[in-house]
Amino acid sequence: MDSLIAAAARALAAGDALGALKRVALRDDPPALALRGIAMAQLGEHPRARELLRRAARGFGKHELLARARCVVAEAEVALAMRDLNGLPRTLAAATATLEARADHANAQHARLIGVRRLLLLGRLDEAQAALARCDAGRLSPSLQAAAGLAGAELALRSLRTAEAREYLVRAEAAAAQARVPALIGEVSEARGALDRPAARRWQRGVDVPLRLGEVEALLASNALVVDACRRGLQGGASWLPLTRRPVLFALARALAEAWPGDVDRNTLIARAFRTRRPDESHRARLRVEAGRLRALVAPLARVEASAHGYALTPRGKRPVVVLLPPVDGEQASLLALLADGAAWSTSAIALALGASQRTVQRALAELEDRGQVRAIGRARARRWLAAAFTEFTTILLLPTALPLA
C-alpha cells in the first residue's frame, strides 16, 4: 500500500471524505477506486459510489479475493443507504465468509452489522437479534462499536425495552466520541432523542394524552386492557391478541374501546367497520356475525355484550380500557414511518419491508403525494420516495416488526 492510499484510508476512517478525495481523485487503480467510492458514499453520492466500488471489485481480479470481499461489503453498505434491500444476503454472506477465512475480522464484523441493519429495516427482529449476538464486540473498532450500539438500541426500542435501549445508547455514545466521527455522533444523538419524543397517544374516556416510549412500555405492562392501534391488536397483561389480518374485528374492538364504559350504537359500528353511510339489513346481519366472532376471540380478555342500542365492551377483572393511538393516524401510517428516516426508498424496498405488493404501495404513495405528505425524486426505475421529516414525535411503534409486544 503506497503512502497516498494509506493517507486516504486514514482520512476516511476519521470521516474526512474530502481529504481522502484530494489524495486519490485522479487515480484509477483498484485501491484508489475503492477509496473514492467510499468517499463518495460518505458525501451522499450513492449511485456514483456504487459504480466506483463495482469497478474496483472488477479491477482486483479473481486472485485478490480479500480486496474484492471488502469492496462487496462497502457496496452492500451503499445499497443499504439507497434502500436497495434485494440481493444483499447472498453476496454479503459470501464476502463475510471470505473475510473470516483470511483473518480480516474487523471487516467481517462490519459485514455482519450491515446484515443486522437490513434485518431491522425489514422488521425481522428475532433474526436481527440472533445476528447481533454473533458480532464479537471485542473485535470492533470504536466506530463499529457505536454502530453495534445503535443497532442494539433500535432492536430494544422496536421491542419496547427502553431501559436496555438506554444502556446501548450510552455505550454507543462513548464509542462514537472515541471514534471522533461527527456523523456518527449525530446519529447517536438523534437515536437518544427518540426516547424523549412522543411515540403514541393514549385515548381514555375522551381524553387524548401523548406518551413517550417508556410510558407506552409501562402502559402495556399494566393491568389495563389496551386496544393497540399501532400494532393492531389487544393487550391484557401478558396476553397479546393480534388482529392485523382481521381489520373488521379490529375496527369493532377500537370503536367499543373508545366508547368504554358506554356502548356504541349499531349504525356507528357499521360505519366504522364496513365504511358505509347507508346501512341496511344486510349490514346489520353482518354486524351480528362479526360481533359474534369478536366475542369468541376476545373471550379471555373481555366480554362483548349486546345493549339496547348496540354493543359494549366489558373487560374481565375490572380492569380499565385504554386505546393506544399512533402519532400519525391513517392507513398509510406504517409507510410514513418507514420514510421518516429521511432516506430515499424505492417502491420495491417499501413493499419488501411492509410485506405488501408493490402495486399496493404505489397506490398508497400516489394518495400521499396528492396530500403533499411524500415526494418523489428521479424517474422510472430510479424513482425514489421521501417524506417530510417528523421532528416532534417518533414513529418507532409504526415500523414493521415480526415480534408481538410482550
Image (cartoon, grey):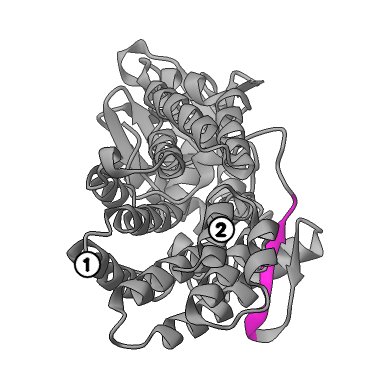
Tell me the number on the disc at residue 7. 2
Q: Residues within 10 Å of mark 2 (few under 14, many from 20)?
A: some
Query: Going by the image, does 395 lie left or right of 129?
Result: right
Query: x, y percentage for residue 374?
Result: 74, 60
Q: What residue type is labelled 2?
A: Ala
The image quadrant where one finds the N terminus is bottom left
Segment tinted magenta in the rendering: 381-388
Query: x, y percentage for residue 380?
Result: 68, 85
Question: Residue 146 sits in which quadrant?
Answer: top left
Q: Label 2: state its secondary structure.
A: helix
Who is closer to the viewer here, 295 or 60? 60
Q: Does the magenta stretch include residue 203?
A: no
Question: Residue 226 sits in which quadrant?
Answer: top left
Residue in the image at 71% along x and 70% along y: 366
Which one is closest to the eye, mark 1 or mark 2? 2
Tell me the number on the disc at residue 97. 1
Q: Which amino acid does label 1 sit on?
A: Ala
Query: Going by the image, does 94 lie left or right of 223?
Result: left
Residue 264 in sight here:
no
Query: Count the marks: how many?
Result: 2
